[in-house]
Each structure stands twice: as structure tokens, then as C-alpha cells.
């Protein structure tokens, strides 16, 4: 690229994180660390019932409780009473009806956190308990209670492709389920609202998308957007959990009412109630093929549980349905998707966003097809692999890179772990060994494969953009480039990528990434594998504008060295990047819905103790289509972390619900993969630059999470011969095999 | 009822009144004002609050502040000497052993204890040594790598320290 000689750390290099030093020294300020003199603490009162009518709320005792400065109810919401990313149907505070257990009903602000908690327990809500709708199918029955005025369907769509009645020689069929997964970022939700002299409010917040928060907060506060200023605070992971608003509006309401700074910081238990989760799914599929394994027809009916409110369910079911045939060339298909309302906790964004659930089902089907036509799982996939120029079930033609064959072949060829006897290895490497439960008497090994794909950025006509400001100046140390956007580094490493882009475009070593806020235009969300493309693209455009001015001043065609004399006065530019426009789907699901795609393939090697039902994943190997790796170390880090979350979904992570209530809202009961659960990941980067994207780089955060659950469960099926139609696979489903 | 506690944190003496129920992690964060020690779970599952107390690594959410009366505490803020990072801090940065960084202080404090007990751990010993600490971002691979790298650096430094006097004489 254009990196000047001597400038280190441009794109393509494994540059260390720009926030690495403050993070390893404990100096990085997370939202939970925020403080202000005289601040109050906010507490949220939540419904214990999944479905109930609020008859009365008595706050008198709470108001008299020590240290209490405000108690607020739905009637105290200054403006619009509801919010939401898509439909604004979620109450800021419930009135009349509560639709899920954990729904906010009242707020308290007090001098000390304990006083706020104490007062919250003194609020008496008189509920008329209603019977909850907790099953997806039950929600769709004609006589089911209507949870929203429009009924219980969030979105229904169908994709009709070719001749959906087309006959085939071989058919395989199955119904698959995935559980409700929690994003479980290690830093729980927190924020600090500070009332301002102009009657507005400044909110310091850990979020994924400052401007979407702003658009939802301001109308609820009945304030013009310019009086609500959001400033990013340190984000302790996100994975979709911070896409929706949690405590933002609540903290602002309390701050405006008390005219004091108010901090709300969730604990882990409240975090489980305070954000949306990954949609549980039930997916029926029927695949028709020729006798030699060539796909002819894919039929699918997908059902996902959106829970109590809309959140991003329309887009999640859009993804799941349009991707239901997998990364394969399929001439005929009928794909029908439905997202439903229930009285379960609301579901929305989590890494993989609908593509994960679909992949779990279609890859199980591909293995069934492989057995039916007597082909190796890799062979049947290679025979049907999608390639550039192919047409998807939506009628959209794949114009960019689609190296599915390459991914599959390379993944299958990655080095296998050595086969070890249970006797001569560390006990920790035996399933159940860590708890001294298993001794390796009944071990069987299995290998499974999966391929899958995911859209990059938002789909179906969403007008997506990112704005960046770049300033190039000179001080006593030489040239300095400053960058500002509203884009959030949630931990994925965006600030480092931005720094690399600036170094490459301007040939300047010193780059300062300013803290994001809403004073600049939206950067969109740090989700959907989109920020490297969108904000990376915006920063590139702004840098190019700055460079043009340098060249004009210098009268040269390359950036002069030294640069200093041309930077007085400093040069600034603000630019907006937009990806190509996409379109909505028609009534038959035809259109041009997605910007671009990232593909992945995974191989899992597992060992099962067939007497105890215990599993050890021995190795994960992932080949991923990355376009171009702008920071290879960081890309591999994304693949490894995404694989761990996939392993969690495959084997242990599930929010357990009973009658709509969460039974395991803690890390002692909701199991996250530990370092002993997680095997080494062999990652393989397939670089085929994507035309039309900055530097040809694709987003890299999601494909591994899409394919790993399917690959692990495929390996368990290979090891045990069991059907295993549901993830996570629990020990009960694996015991008693011999 | 309140108790007066005094402890040394990162070489500095702190003395405050606490309630008997006050957890050490809240004392460190709220009263000593050292927010590098994080709270991730409230149930002693995640290890984000790991600190060193009298030479042992402890999850500071499982210790009452009154139990730490008179103790020597080291938190993440006590590892670097000025701008000179501790080898573990340097290695976590170099090896990309962190993403969001929320688990990192606890991970480093747990790893420090591990390397003090076992300066040359195998990969399995590293994994076993820090299995009480959760990371949601990295898949742990680069955390293992970082601890291996730090172990090598610390061994090399220890070697130099031993050799140095000989070179002088």
C-alpha cells in the first residue's frame, strides 16, 4: 500500500492494540468505574412475573426510605413511553401489563447503592398474574392471548426460489433446535447520566451504537436530540448485548428529576434480565438431492422466539430465512420463517444473528444427505459449494468472493491433533478429568465439519453509513493525525484498525483516536461484522481528502517528507462512507437484500466418554474468508473468541426458562466455557479481496461463531451415532451408549 | 457496627472504617479508589477481581475487608514500575492476550501467582493454573501464549540477575 518508508504499523501488519497499555495496567476506565462528586445510585424494580396486569403501585414506603431522592414510575417518563431499535414497542417502565419476568416497573435513586436496593424492595406492586405464553407454537394458536395489538407474529417471510415442488431422488428431513444463549460480556451494563445546565443531559455509557441509543433516548425524555449528548465509556465486551438500550433512559430520567449525576451499574444477575439474548429456534428442513448428492430442493420452516418485544427480531428471522439453504448452490427452495412474541425474555442481537441457528440446521441436513448418498461430509459439501456468480434463493447473485470450496478443502487439510491413549496423558485432557470424574475408560473420538455464511453490515435496504473526521497537524514532535468517529471499540480492536488505516493513508506515525461521542455523525453499530468496512472506509475517505490538500499545498504527487511545513494551518476533513444500497424482499422473498457475505468452514474433533456423557473438544480448526486481513493477529483473535462462543452454544450455554422465568441468572448456573473447556483453535485465513470494500477486507467477527456449533455437534454425532437435534447437547443425551 | 481496617495496597498504607459485610473488592474499588480490579459476576465464578493478598492470589469478592486487616495487597495497578510494564503485562499486550480487557487484570494477577509457584509451566499447567478466570473475548489461546512468553522473559531476567554480580567481579 501507500505506507511511506519508515512508518510502522500500517494495514496488513499485526499491530498491537492501541488501548493495550491502559488495559494491562488497570487504568482503562470502564463504564462500571465511572464516578462523579455528589452522584446518586439508580436501581431498577423488575417484574417477577412473565405476564401480569399492574393493578396498583405503592411507592410511599420507598419514598420514606433512607437516602432516597426519587422514585419514578411509567407516568414519570417525560416523553414517549416506549422505545426499541425497530418497532418502538418496549415500555421504558411498564404500565398496565408486564410481558416478561424482569421487565422494569419502577426506578429508585438514592445516595448509596445499598439504600437504593433497600428502597426498591419497599415498592409494592399489586399484580394480577396472567397465564404466560411461553411456547412458540402456542403463541401462534388462534386462541392464544394476544401479547401485542397486532398479535403474536413479529415477522413472517417466505423465500420462493425456482420450482419449490421440484422432485428429487433422495430426501432427508429433520427438526433442529437451539437454545437461548446469553452474550455474557464480562463487563455488566453501566452508565452515568449527568444533568446539564441547558436542561439536557450528558450520558457516559458503554454501548455498541451511540446514535441509535440517542434516537431512542431523546424522544422518551422529551428533549431535542442536541440536548442529549452521549459519550462512550469503556466497554467490557458486547457481542450484541449492548445493541439494545438497557439502563440508558432510566439513568437520564433519574438525573433530570433529581438534578444530580446518577449512576446505574447492573450486577451479573440483573445483566441477565437487562439485555436481550440469542433467539431460541426450532427449524424443520427437508433436503432433496440427486442420487449422487447434488442438491435440487431445500424446504425449511424456521421458528424463532422473539420473546416479549420486537428488538431486532425482524432482521434476525430475515437472516435465518434467507440463509437457510446454506452456502450451497440450490436451484429450488421454499424457506418460510416466523419470529413470534411470547412472554419469554426479549431476544435480539447476538454474534451470528440468525445465521447461527440456520447453520446448525442446514449443516445437520448436509451430513444426513452425505450418509444417504454415501459420500464423505466434505465431498457432499464440495459438490454443492456456492461460488462467485451463483444465485442465492433470494435471487441475489453473489458478486464478491465466495471461496467455499477453498475453505472446505483447506479446513479438511489442516493438521489433526495426535491420537493419544487416555493412559499416557494428563488427566485434565480426559473428559471429566478436571473434576476427577472421568478416567478415560470409554472414550470415543468423532470428527465433524460445517460450512456457513453470514451477511456483512445491515441488510434489506437499511441506509447504512459511518462518518469520520481526520485532522493532520504538526507539533514539536512532528506530524500528528487525530481521528474521531462515533464508532465503538467494544474490544474487537477497531481503534487499532483505524490507526493502521491512518498510518497507511497519510504516512504519519503518530495517530490519536479520540473518544467517540454524538457530536459527530453516526458510525452505525459495532455489530454485523461491519465497522472495519464502514468506519475503516470513512476514515480512509477522510484521510484521502486530507492527503489531497497536502499534495495541493506541496505541489507534489506523493506525500512530501518531511511533511511539517505543509501542515500550518492544520488540515481537516470529514467524510461519510456508505456501502452499496441493498433492497427489500418482495412477497416471495426475492430481491437484493445483502451487501456482502463472509464464509467460514470448521472442523471439530471431540472425545466422548460414552459411559458418563462427558465431552472434551480436542481441537477446532477454522478456515475463514476474510477478504484481506488488515491485522492478522487481531483477525485470529476474533476467530478464536468467536469459536469459544460457538463451543458454548454447542455444549453448555443456555438460559434455562421455566414458565418464562430465568432459572440460571448467574455464572455459577449459566456455564461459560473456561480455559479447560476450550481447546486450541487452528485458524486459517483465506484472503481473496472483496471488490468494492475498503482494502478488500471483510468483517471477521462472526463466521466462526456461525460454523463452530454445527461442527462440534456433527463431531458428537460421528462419535456417538446419536441424532442430537438440539444444541446445547447435554450429558444426558450422550450417556448409556455402551 | 463499623470496623477500622488498615492494609498496604501496592506499597501504600490505607486506613478506613468499613462495615463488617464490606467485601475486599468494594474496599479496593470504592474506598481505596483503585478501579483496575473489576467485578464481573458477584458469585466468585469469573476471577475478574483477583488480587494478591499476603502472597496468595485471591478472588477479592470472596474476602471481607476486615479479613484483610493488616494484609499486604497487590492489585494490577501495583505491577508496572513507572512506564516499565511487568513481563506479564507486556506479554498480554504483545501476544494479543486481551480484547475488551475486562478480565485482564484478574488474569494477570492469577498468572503472576502461577508463575511464582511454577516458573516454567507447561500449557496444561497454565490452563489449570488460571481455570478460575473467565474470558469471554479471546478463546484463551493468546492468554496461554502470553503467559508462556512472560515465563520465558522472567526466566531470562532472573538469569541475568544471577549472572550480573559474576560479571562485575
Image (cartoon, coloured by chain):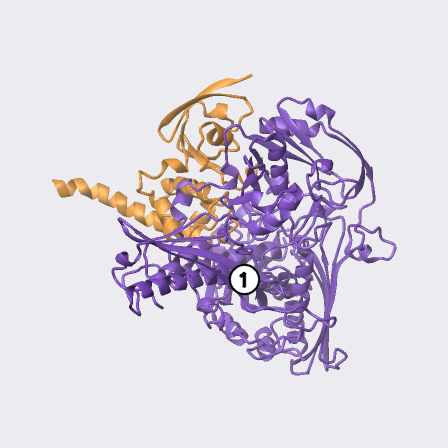
Chain colours: A purple, B orange
Q: Is residue B7 left or right of residue A335?
A: left
Q: Position of residue B30 (x, y in %)?
A: 49, 29
Residue placed furthest toward the top? B1
Q: Nearer the viewer, residue A612 or A260?
A: A260
Residue sitting at the far left: B169
User: Is residue A309 toward the left or the right of residue B102 in the image?
Assistant: right
Instruction: Residue under label 1, please give it.
Output: A704
Residue at 40 percent across and 44 percent down: it is A22
A511 sits left or right of A277 in the view: left
Which quarter of the image is occupied by the N terminus of chain B?
top right
Rate crowding at label 1 as few (under 14), some (14 to 19) or many (20 or more) other CA atoms within 10 Å.
many
Instruction: Tell me if residue A436 comes above or below residue A336 in the rendering.
Output: above
Residue A191 in view here: no
Give me the chain letter of mark 1: A
Residue sitting nearer the eye, A56 or A50 = A56
Q: Position of residue A49 (x, y in %)?
A: 76, 40
A318 is higher (above) or lower (below) than A202: below
SS at circle 1: helix
| Total numbered circles | 1
- For the view shown, which residue lies furthest in the right direction? A143
Quadrant that contains the C terminus of chain B:
top left
Is A276 situated above or below A558?
above
The structure residue drawn at horizontal position 68% and vertical position 57%, both measured from the top left corner, is A313
For image coordinates 27% across by 43% down, the residue present is B158
Q: Is residue A693 visible?
A: yes
| Residue A607 spot, x, y in % from top left | 56, 59
Amino acid at each position: 500500500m501507500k505506507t511511506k518508508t519508515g512508518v510502522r504499523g500500517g494495514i496488513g501488519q499485526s499491530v498491537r492494540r492501541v488501548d493495550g497499555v491502559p488495559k494491562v495496567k488497570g487504568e482503562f476506565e470502564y463504564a462500571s468505574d465511572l464516578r462523579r462528586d455528589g452522584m446518586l445510585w439508580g436501581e431498577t424494580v423488575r417484574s417477577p412475573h412473565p405476564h401480569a396486569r399492574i393493578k396498583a403501585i405503592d411507592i410511599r414506603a420507598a419514598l420514606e426510605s433512607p437516602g432516597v431522592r426519587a422514585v419514578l414510575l411509567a407516568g414519570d417518563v417525560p416523553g414517549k413511553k416506549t422505545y426499541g431499535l425497530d418497532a418502538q414497542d418496549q415500555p421504558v417502565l411498564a404500565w398496565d401489563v408486564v410481558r416478561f419476568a424482569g421487565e422494569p416497573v419502577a426506578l429508585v435513586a438514592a445516595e448509596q447503592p445499598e439504600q437504593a436496593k433497600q428502597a426498591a424492595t419497599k415498592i409494592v406492586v399489586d399484580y394480577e398474574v396472567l397465564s404466560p405464553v411461553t411456547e412458540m407454537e402456542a403463541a401462534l394458536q388462534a386462541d392464544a392471548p394476544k401479547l401485542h395489538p397486532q398479535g403474536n407474529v413479529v415477522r413472517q417471510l417466505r423465500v420462493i426460489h425456482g420450482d419449490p415442488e421440484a422432485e428429487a431422488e433422495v430426501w432427508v428431513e429433520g427438526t433442529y433446535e437451539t437454545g437461548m444463549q446469553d452474550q455474557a460480556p464480562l463487563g455488566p451494563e453501566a452508565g452515568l447520566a449527568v444533568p446539564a445546565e441547558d436542561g439536557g443531559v450528558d450520558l457516559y455509557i458503554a454501548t455498541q451504537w451511540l446514535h441509535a441509543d440517542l434516537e431512542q433516548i431523546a424522544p422518551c425524555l422529551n428533549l431535542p436530540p442536541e440536548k442529549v449528548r452521549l459519550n462512550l465509556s469503556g466497554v467490557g465486551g458486547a457481542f450484541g448485548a449492548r445493541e439494545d438500550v438497557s439502563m440508558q433512559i432510566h439513568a437520564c430520567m433519574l438525573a433530570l428529576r433529581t438534578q444530580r449525576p446518577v449512576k446505574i451499574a447492573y450486577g451479573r444477575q440483573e445483566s441477565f434480565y437487562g439485555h436481550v439474548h440469542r433467539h431460541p429456534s426450532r427449524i424443520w428442513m427437508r433436503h432433496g438431492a440427486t442420487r449422487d448428492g447434488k442438491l435440487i430442493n431445500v424446504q425449511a420452516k424456521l421458528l424463532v422466539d422473539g420473546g416479549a418485544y420486537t428488538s431486532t427480531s425482524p432482521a434476525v428471522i430475515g437472516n435465518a430465512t434467507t440463509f437457510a439453504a446454506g452456502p450451497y448452490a440450490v436451484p429450488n427452495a421454499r424457506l418460510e420463517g416466523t419470529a413470534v412474541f411470547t412472554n419469554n425474555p426479549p431476544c435480539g442481537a447476538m454474534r451470528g444473528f440468525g445465521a447461527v441457528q440456520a447453520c446448525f440446521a442446514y449443516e445437520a441436513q448436509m451430513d444426513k444427505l452425505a450418509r444417504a448418498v454415501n459420500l464423505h461430509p466434505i465431498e457432499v459439501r464440495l459438490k454443492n459449494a456456492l461460488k462467485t456468480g451463483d444465485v442465492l434463493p433470494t435471487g441475489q447473485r453473489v458478486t464478491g468472493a465466495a471461496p467455499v470450496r477453498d475453505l472446505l478443502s483447506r479446513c479438511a487439510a489442516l493438521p489433526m491433533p495426535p491420537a493419544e491413549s487416555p493412559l499416557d496423558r494428563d488427566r485434565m485432557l480426559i473428559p471429566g478429568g478436571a473434576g476427577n470424574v472421568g478416567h478415560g475408560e470409554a472414550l470415543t473420538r468423532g470428527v465433524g465439519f460445517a460450512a456457513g455464511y453470514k451477511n456483512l453490515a445491515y441488510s434489506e435496504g437499511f441506509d447504512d453509513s459511518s462518518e469520520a473526521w481526520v485532522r493532520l497537524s504538526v507539533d514539536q514532535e512532528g506530524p500528528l493525525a487525530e481521528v474521531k468517529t462515533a464508532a465503538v471499540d467494544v474490544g474487537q480492536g477497531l481503534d487499532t484498525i483505524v490507526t493502521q488505516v491512518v498510518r497507511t493513508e497519510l504516512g504519519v506515525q503518530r495517530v490519536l483516536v479520540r473518544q467517540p461521542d454524538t457530536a459527530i455523525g453516526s458510525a452505525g453499530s459495532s455489530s454485523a461484522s461491519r465497522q472495519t468496512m464502514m468506519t475503516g472506509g470513512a476514515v480512509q475517505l477522510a484521510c484521502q481528502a486530507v492527503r489531497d490538500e497536502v499534495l495541493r499545498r506541496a505541489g507534489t504527487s506523493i506525500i512530501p517528507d518531511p511533511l511539517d511545513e505543509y501542515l500550518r494551518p492544520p488540515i481537516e476533513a470529514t467524510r461519510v462512507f456508505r456501502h452499496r444500497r441493498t433492497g427489500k424482499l418482495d412477497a416471495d422473498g426475492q430481491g437484493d437484500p445483502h451487501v456482502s457475505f463472509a464464509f467460514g468452514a470448521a472442523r471439530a474433533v471431540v472425545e466422548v466418554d460414552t459411559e458418563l456423557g462427558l465431552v472434551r473438544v480436542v481441537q477446532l480448526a477454522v478456515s475463514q474468508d476474510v477478504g484481506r486481513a488488515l491485522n492478522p493477529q487481531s483477525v485470529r483473535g476474533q476467530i478464536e473468541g468467536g469459536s469459544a462462543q460457538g463451543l458454548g452454544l454447542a455444549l453448555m450455554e443456555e438460559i434455562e426458562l421455566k414458565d418464562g422465568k430465568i432459572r440460571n441468572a448467574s455464572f455459577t448456573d449459566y456455564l461459560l466455557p473456561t480455559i479447560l473447556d476450550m481447546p486450541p483453535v487452528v485458524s486459517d485465513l483465506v484472503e481473496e479481496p472483496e471488490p468494492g470494500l475498503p482494502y478488500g477486507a471483510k468483517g471477521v467477527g462472526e463466521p466462526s461463531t456461525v460454523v463452530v456449533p454445527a461442527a462440534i455437534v456433527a463431531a458428537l454425532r460421528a462419535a456417538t451415532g446419536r441424532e442430537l437435534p438440539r444444541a446445547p447437547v447435554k450429558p444426558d443425551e450422550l450417556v448409556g451408549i455402551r | 457496627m463499623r470496623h477500622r481496617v488498615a492494609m498496604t495496597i501496592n506499597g501504600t498504607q490505607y486506613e478506613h472504617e468499613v462495615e463488617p459485610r464490606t467485601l475486599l473488592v468494594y474496599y479496593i474499588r470504592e474506598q481505596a479508589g483503585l478501579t483496575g480490579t473489576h467485578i464481573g459476576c458477584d458469585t466468585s465464578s469469573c476471577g475478574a477481581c483477583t488480587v494478591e493478598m499476603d502472597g496468595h492470589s485471591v478472588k477479592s469478592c470472596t474476602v471481607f475487608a476486615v479479613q484483610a486487616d493488616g494484609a499486604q495487597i497487590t492489585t494490577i495497578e501495583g505491577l508496572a514500575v513507572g512506564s516499565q510494564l511487568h513481563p506479564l503485562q507486556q506479554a498480554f499486550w504483545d501476544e494479543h492476550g486481551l480484547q475488551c480487557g475486562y478480565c485482564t487484570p484478574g488474569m494477570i494477577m492469577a498468572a503472576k501467582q502461577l508463575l511464582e509457584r511454577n516458573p516454567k509451566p507447561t500449557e496444561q499447567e497454565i490452563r489449570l493454573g488460571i481455570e478460575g478466570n473467565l474470558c469471554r473475548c479471546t478463546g484463551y489461546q493468546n492468554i496461554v501464549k502470553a503467559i508462556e512468553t512472560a515465563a520465558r522473559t522472567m526466566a531470562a531476567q532472573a538469569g541475568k540477575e544471577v549472572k550480573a554480580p559474576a560479571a562485575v567481579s
